[in-house]
Image (spheres, rainbow, N blue to C red):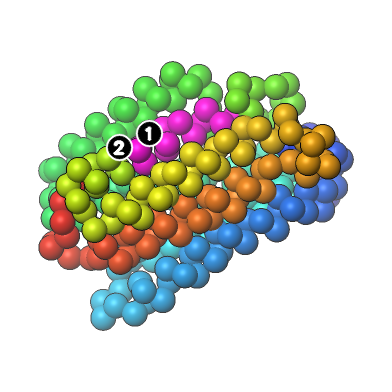
Amino acid sequence: MLSPRFIDLYCERTAPGFWDEPVNAVSNAAFLLAAAYALPVAMGRERRDLLELLLIALGGCIGIGSFLFHTLASPAAELADVIPIWSFVTLYVLAVIWRTTGQNVVRTARIAVIAAVATCIAIWIGGQSVTTGADPAPMRLNGSLQYLPALIALTVFAGIAFARQHPACGLVAGATLVFFLSLVFRTIDLQVCAATGGVGTHFLWHLLNGLMVGLLLQALVVHMPPGRHNPEL
């Protein structure tokens, strides 16, 4: 049964029904496909890496959590949506730092602290929490400012990868561009609602983010495998 406090944030939702956002809900399959594409590489290693498998699982959980949010539309379902997202972002950043510093604990901790401080500053500048809340009042950029830290992190990651000609630079740059484009579609969802026949563009946020997660997972499992011999960033 749906909560009477259902969250109505997107163009496609018009009522508190479980299947009132069918396109937004089904488009989350993109995350499951991204995880499924990376899994054979990780499973095919002689020694399977728990960090990789956890990231792949989180990539799939993003799709499951978002599906729940766009069907149940409740505050609890929103947590199921955002927790896998930010868990993936945090763990991915740590995994990249860990593998490209030769699994050096001190360097990893130092860079992680710098990244955490930068993230807090970006969130403060954006002036929004990582959840969008149940208040249907219009938000700045439709709540997309909460993803500013992730965009900044990807941009920095791509810049460093290109500057050092890291083998993963193409995948990371592609992921950055895809994420920026997905943010555009997330932001304009309500503004173009009438022009899209009530469907909106939020489903493109899901499809493109699924592609982004797929690119990032491939960058990690293919070009930054477990071990101490990865090219540094």
Instruction: Judge the density around disc 2: few (<14), some (14-19), many (≥20) Cα neighbours within 10 Å.
Output: some
Position of residue 138 measured from the top left corner of the image (x, y, whole percent): 70, 22
Q: Is residue 30 above or below residue 44?
A: above
Q: Amino acid at mark 1?
A: Ile
Q: Is residue 132 above or below residue 33?
A: above
Q: Which image quadrant for residue 99?
A: bottom left
Name the mark on residue 167: none
Q: Amino acid at mark 2?
A: Val
Name the mark on residue 156: 2
Q: Do the numbered discs 1 and 2 sit on residues whose CB atoms are within 8 Å?
A: yes
Q: Is residue 56 magenta?
A: no
* Extent of the magenta region: 143-156
Instruction: Give the SS element for disc 1.
Output: helix
Position of residue 45 measured from the top left corner of the image (x, y, whole percent): 29, 77
In the rendered view, does 205 fall on the left or right side of 6? left
Name the mark on residue 152: 1
Q: Which image quadrant for residue 185?
A: top right
Position of residue 118 measured from the top left corner of the image (x, y, whole percent): 32, 28
Would residue 199 be visible to someone looking at this image?
yes
In the rendered view, does 60 fall on the left or right side of 77? left
Q: Which image quadrant for residue 205?
A: top right
